[in-house]
Image (spheres, rainbow, N blue to C red):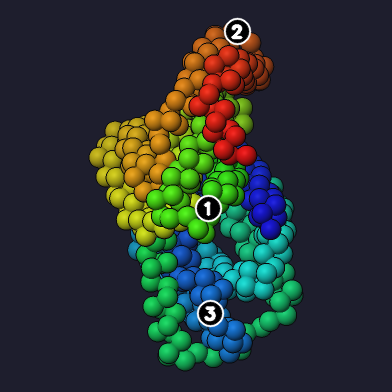
Amino acid sequence: MGFAAMASRVSAQLAQVAVFVLAARMLSAAEFGVYTLTLAVAIFLTRVSEAGSREFLMSCREDRSLFDQIATAALVSGVIAMCAGTVASAVMYDFFDMVLAGELLALFSVWVVFSTVSAVYAGLLVRQSRAELHSIFLMVGEGVGLLAALFGLMSGWGIFALAFGKFCMQITYLACAIATTRWIPRLRLHWVVVRELAEFSRYILATRMVAYFHTYAVTFIIGIFLGATSVGYYRVAERLGSSFAELMEEPARLIAWVSLRRAVREDHSAAELKRNVGKEAAVFLPILLALAAPIFIGLALISENLVVLLLGEQWHPAAPLTSILALVYMLYIPNVLTEPLLSLTGQVRRLPFISLLNAAIAVTFILASVSFGTVGVAIGQLMAGLITVCVTIWLQSHYGGVAWKTVGFHASIVAPALIAMVAGVIWVSAVAVSPEIQLGLQILTGAVIYSGVLGTLYLCFFWKHPRISIQRQEST
């Protein structure tokens, strides 16, 4: 199941990046911004309409009549969300003369229904222990969506090609799920089930809304104060950084769960459990930081050549944003361990409040910096990230038993390697060659210098260090 989920994640990222690169080359920043804003509204409608229907189906009693009612409730909420989106699109079209955004939102409003019903089938597949099929269907859907979006872009459909790709992806997944489960729900719904579903879903929905606004607040704030073109540039920079972050976070989270669970024993007291899990995390975190730091700092250094060569000269204003946001994503890497740490130590109830606090910090800095333009917003997010990483360290130390002084000691050899890497990449940047060759040399030089310096320092100072040896033996 883990491999299938990982493969699904990687294939989805590759498909989305392929569409993103081609779309960026064929669309203007303003068009890309309109698409981003409209999709953010559609995702909000989807989050609300899905609520906790998938999780409720996975955890409820075995009752086909109840399954039918959950699916009916999801369909009804999806239709209500579609109507709300359609009304909003009509208002945008008729009263604000936002023709492109209005038409696109009307299309996405229909997509919301398919997405909401698909969530129910995803829950059913997981309940039936067929999570591998769920991941495979997602991969197939992403592949079909990629081909559909590419066809639309090559046919000159503009941003509507991207919406068409999402439609095809969702319909493909839903068709595969229906064919596999051989279940078409009968439309029935009792008020007692509605109340039960609402009671179950309210905490899930609240948590997802916090996560949603944390993710999309910057999109709406830039759109309101700076316009769609600025949203386009900012979103491109975000997408470049998040592509690396998402590919790293999913495997890291999975490995963290496996690694930390090895320290859990049923006969352990709460104090022993916290100490053992924290000790395991203190071994894992330096490795994670050593892998993540050069990727994001390297992205910050090569962003100018990367953006221009990958997306075209028209996206050059996104290069400085990419550099700053790459550092932001690097700061969020330690947060990958927070969920498994707090879950295994029985402190998972702390997560909603911490998520709300981090979101509030991020939104405050975005609002305070938006008057300075998109670069100001990116710097504001960097400041928020610095505060968030401090909160993460305190949370993991206080409730997860992680000795961050030990983590810092273990990760100390990363700093000289990073400094050497940065110096090498900057030196290559001054060489008068074509941008393509320069980019290749930057990546090669940075990788060779970092790995060489890090490996040498590890062998010289850490390989036979008693503290490392003891912890290495305890972790095996």
Relative to 271, residue 120 above or below = below
Kind of element beneath mark 3: loop
Residue at the spot of label 1? 264
Kind of element beneath mark 1: loop
Q: Nearer the viewer, residue 312 or 74?
A: 74
Residue at 59%, 21% in the rendered image: 463
- Pointer 1 or 2: first along the chain: 1
> Measured from the top left, where is residue 137 in percent x and y?
70, 62
Q: Nearer the viewer, residue 433 or 241?
A: 241
> Measured from the top left, where is residue 332 in percent x and y?
44, 40
Which of the two marks, 2 or 3, is nearer to us in this view?
Answer: 3
Kind of element beneath mark 2: loop
> Measured from the top left, where is residue 118 in percent x and y?
60, 70
Label 1 crowd bin: few (<14), some (14–19), many (20+), radius 10 Å: some
Residue at 47%, 34% in the rendered image: 330
Label 2 crowd bin: few (<14), some (14–19), many (20+), radius 10 Å: few
Q: Amino acid at mark 1?
A: Val
- Pointer 3 or 1: first along the chain: 3
From the image, which quarter does the C terminus lie in?
top right
The numbered dot on residue 110 is none
Residue 235 in view (yes/no): no
